[in-house]
């Protein structure tokens, strides 16, 4: 059954003249006004500018000027992405008064594609420290149950999609900050291959681990958003000069004949794995087999190695980014961010170089596994989203592997746990083969019936 509110369906109605961008934008702004006082997904709503942009989009479409699949479609930016003329707060008082002079590469691509920017979204402080209550903006809350966290750091991005405020948002991912919130909030979260999407104009956390990608209501919506976001940018030193395929082509081919490798050693014996999450993973693997996929167990190095590698590299690089500001304005950071950033003091050059050497070994292991498999299927959330009052040092997530290796990975919702909160599965693929990852994700959301699950509010 076709979703009448999908980006593709809305785009078709805009071009047929049975819908207007002004109408879509008015509806989105009304939903934000209704729900955001509780959910806090948005730091800033640009209602007047959004309505003007929507009117311009309608005028262009009436004259046959079509900018692409997001033309006239509302979206929102995580507030570490610059948008010209708007503050970039990074959810921190450290950035008080900072106004972007230029668009980030991602904001520029959406603007050129005719998308309608609704505003800026909540994040953990500098995409790391949270959920925090001692900084200028309240933390976003999970729309399935506001007593539970939405995950981070792309918290507002996931909440805005899950609450139906918008179909597409942007996120960044250094240690799981796209896929973690997506898993906890029941949205699709895609971390593309390292270098696929430019990070120019995005405040860095750890430059060799940072990725940008979309969060979306469906896999198809994510594919359309990635189509707009992807492409080489010589102004980003990490950007890859690789051709960008049509991500919607082959999206509905199903999984018959695809080989899924399952690294059970990552999650089977992890103490944070809940019965609901285990049952959800196994049920999803069964429906994949029934649909004609070849599902096999594989071995990879221990997940702990990937996690530790990620932590050492991230600690060193994020401290390097923030050291000058920490020295001058330490008390302006929230407590969680300050503690995490200063942990990099303990990482010396030998530690950092050892982690980078280990990173090559770990990446090669994933490459070898993908020589005999089309994609890998593994856990992302080890349990449903914790309550705010139960957040501990160990978050029940396993996202770090593919930030370390740079492979594309997607979180796809698969159902609801007994507490009524979302469960998810992670699929990863070969470098720059987002198309196959999206194809597998599309089949999962359909085979599990997630595409028929209504929004929580």
Image (cartoon, rainbow, N blue to C red):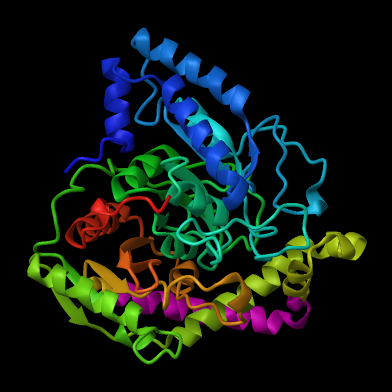
**Residue lying furthest right:** 328
Q: In the rendered image, which quarter is residue 333 located in? A: bottom right
Residue depicted at 11% across the width and 72% down the height: 289
- Compare residues 387 and 318 and report the one nearer the observer: 387
Residue depicted at 76% across the width and 54% down the height: 92
- Compare residues 87 and 139 and report the one nearer the observer: 139
Q: Is residue 277 magenta?
A: no
Q: Is residue 243 visible?
A: no
Q: In the rendered image, which quarter is residue 193 located in? A: bottom left
- 12 vs 447, left or right, is right
Q: Is residue 350 magenta?
A: yes
* Residue 303 horizontal/vertical position (percent): 44, 84
* Residue 116 horizontal/vertical position (percent): 50, 28
Residue depicted at 48% across the width and 78% down the height: 396
Q: Which residues are magenta?
A: 343-369
- 70 vs 306, left or right, is left
Q: Height in image: 239 above or below 298?
A: above
Q: Give the total number of marks visible in the rendering.
A: 0
Predominant SS along the magenta part: helix
């Amino acid at each position: 059954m076709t979703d009448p509110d999908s980006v593709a369906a809305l785009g078709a109605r805009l071009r047929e003249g049975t819908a207007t961008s002004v109408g879509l934008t008015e509806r989105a702004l009304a939903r934000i006004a209704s729900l955001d006082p509780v959910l806090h997904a948005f730091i800033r709503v640009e209602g007047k500018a959004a309505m003007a942009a929507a009117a311009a989009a309608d005028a262009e479409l009436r004259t046959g000027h079509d900018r692409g699949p997001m033309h006239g479609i509302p979206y929102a930016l995580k507030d570490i992405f610059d948008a010209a003329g708007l503050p970039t707060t990074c959810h921190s008082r450290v950035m008080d008064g900072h106004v972007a002079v230029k668009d980030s590469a991602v904001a520029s691509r959406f603007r050129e594609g005719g998308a309608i920017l609704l505003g800026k979204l909540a994040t953990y402080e500098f995409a790391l420290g949270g959920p925090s209550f001692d900084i200028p903006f309240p933390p976003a809350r999970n729309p399935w149950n506001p007593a539970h966290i939405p995950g981070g750091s792309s918290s507002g991005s996931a909440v805005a999609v899950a609450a139906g405020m918008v179909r597409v948002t942007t996120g960044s991912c250094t240690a799981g900050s796209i896929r973690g919130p997506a898993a906890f909030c029941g949205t699709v979260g895609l971390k593309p291959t390292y270098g696929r999407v430019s990070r120019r104009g995005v405040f860095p956390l750890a430059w060799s681990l940072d990725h940008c990608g979309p969060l979306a209501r469906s896999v198809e919506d994510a594919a359309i958003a990635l189509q707009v976001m992807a492409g080489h940018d010589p102004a980003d030193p990490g950007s890859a000069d690789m051709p960008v395929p049509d991500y919607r082509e082959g999206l509905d081919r199903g999984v018959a004949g695809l080989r899924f490798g399952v690294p059970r050693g990552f999650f089977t014996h992890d103490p944070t794995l809940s019965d609901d999450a285990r049952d959800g993973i196994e049920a999803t693997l069964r429906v994949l087999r029934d649909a004609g996929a070849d599902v096999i167990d594989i071995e990879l190095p221990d997940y702990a190695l990937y996690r530790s590698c990620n932590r050492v590299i991230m600690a060193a690089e994020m401290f390097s980014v923030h050291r000058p500001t920490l020295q001058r304005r330490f008390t302006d950071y929230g407590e969680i961010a300050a503690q995490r950033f200063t942990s990099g003091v303990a990482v010396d050059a030998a530690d950092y170089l050892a982690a980078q050497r280990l990173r090559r070994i770990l990446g090669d292991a994933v490459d070898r596994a993908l020589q005999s498999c089309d994609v890998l299927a593994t856990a992302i959330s080890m349990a449903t989203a914790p309550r705010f009052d139960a957040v501990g040092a160990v978050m029940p997530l396993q996202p770090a592997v593919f930030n370390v290796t740079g492979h594309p990975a997607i979180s796809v919702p698969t159902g609801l746990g007994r507490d009524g909160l979302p469960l998810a599965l992670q699929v990863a693929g070969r470098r720059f083969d987002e198309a196959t990852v999206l194809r597998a994700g599309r089949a999962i959301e359909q085979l599990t019936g997630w595409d028929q699950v209504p929004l929580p509010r």
